[in-house]
Each structure stands twice: as structure tokens, then as C-alpha cells.
């Protein structure tokens, strides 16, 4: 096992490409995207939005701890400009062989 950072982003689907480009630019090349995410946050509920362009996405990615600073530097301006939220937690990867990107 080895330590990794788990990055969870909830944002407007319209900004998905920019967010994935920012992750890639930061050295985070793998991710999963869950589309049509609804819920209630500080801005209220999103379940009743009619336009698919306004649907939210949930992005989850993992990176080595030393890549976190570039991720924050590249993601924060997008979230500040377009909205959304990002959470980072410490976790462990149990893969016995580390993948090299």
C-alpha cells in the first residue's frame, strides 16, 4: 500500500473539458466521471434543472501527494470562475505495483 490523494470535484458539466484538461496539465492522467449528478449544496437543489447543459458532473481522480499543489493551482481558478467544489482526502492505494504515467 502507498499513500495517494483522492480528488473529488462536483461542477457544471459545461466545464468538464476545462477541468479534465487542468487535471491532465497537473499530471493527473486518470479519472472517472459520473454525469447527471443532482443534490443540494450551498446554492440549493439541482434536481429540477431542465437543461442538460446545466447538469452537474462528479469527477474522481487519484494522484501522488507531490502532485496536489499543481492540481490546486490549476483547478482553483476554474472553480472560482465557473463554480463547483473540490474535496481532497488522504487515502491508500493497495495496488502492489505503482503505475508510472
Image: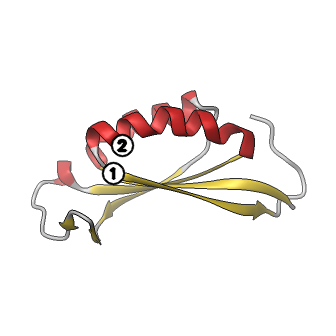
- Helix, strand, or loop for circle 2? helix
Q: Residues within 10 Å of mark 2 (few under 14, many from 20)?
A: some
Q: Do residues under tags 2 and 1 come within 8 Å of each other at their CB atoms?
A: yes
Residue displayed at 19% across by 52% down = 54
Q: Is residue 42 left or right of residue 64?
A: left
- Helix, strand, or loop for circle 1? loop
Name of the residue lying farthest toward the left: 50
Judging by the rendered image, the residue that carries numbered circle 1 is 84
To which quarter of the image does residue 71 belong?
A: top right
| 22 lies above or below 6 | above
Residue displayed at 89% across by 51% down = 97
To which quarter of the image does residue 44 belong?
A: bottom left
Judging by the rendered image, the residue that carries numbered circle 2 is 79
Tell me how far mark 2 sits from mark 1, CA to CA. Answer: 5 Å
Q: Is residue 28 left or right of residue 60?
A: right
In the depicted view, which residue is nearer to us: 26 or 17? 26
Point out the image quarter for the C terminus.
top right
Amino acid at each position: 500500500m502507498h499513500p495517494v490523494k483522492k480528488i473529488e470535484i462536483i461542477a457544471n458539466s459545461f466545464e468538464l473539458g476545462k477541468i479534465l484538461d487542468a487535471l491532465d496539465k497537473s499530471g493527473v492522467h486518470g479519472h472517472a466521471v459520473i454525469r447527471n449528478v443532482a443534490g443540494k449544496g450551498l446554492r440549493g437543489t439541482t434536481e429540477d434543472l431542465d437543461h442538460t447543459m446545466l447538469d452537474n458532473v462528479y469527477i474522481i481522480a487519484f494522484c501522488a501527494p507531490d502532485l496536489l499543489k499543481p492540481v490546486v493551482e490549476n483547478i482553483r481558478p476554474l472553480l472560482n470562475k465557473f463554480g463547483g467544489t473540490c474535496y481532497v482526502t488522504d487515502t491508500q492505494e493497495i495496488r502492489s505495483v505503482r503505475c508510472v504515467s
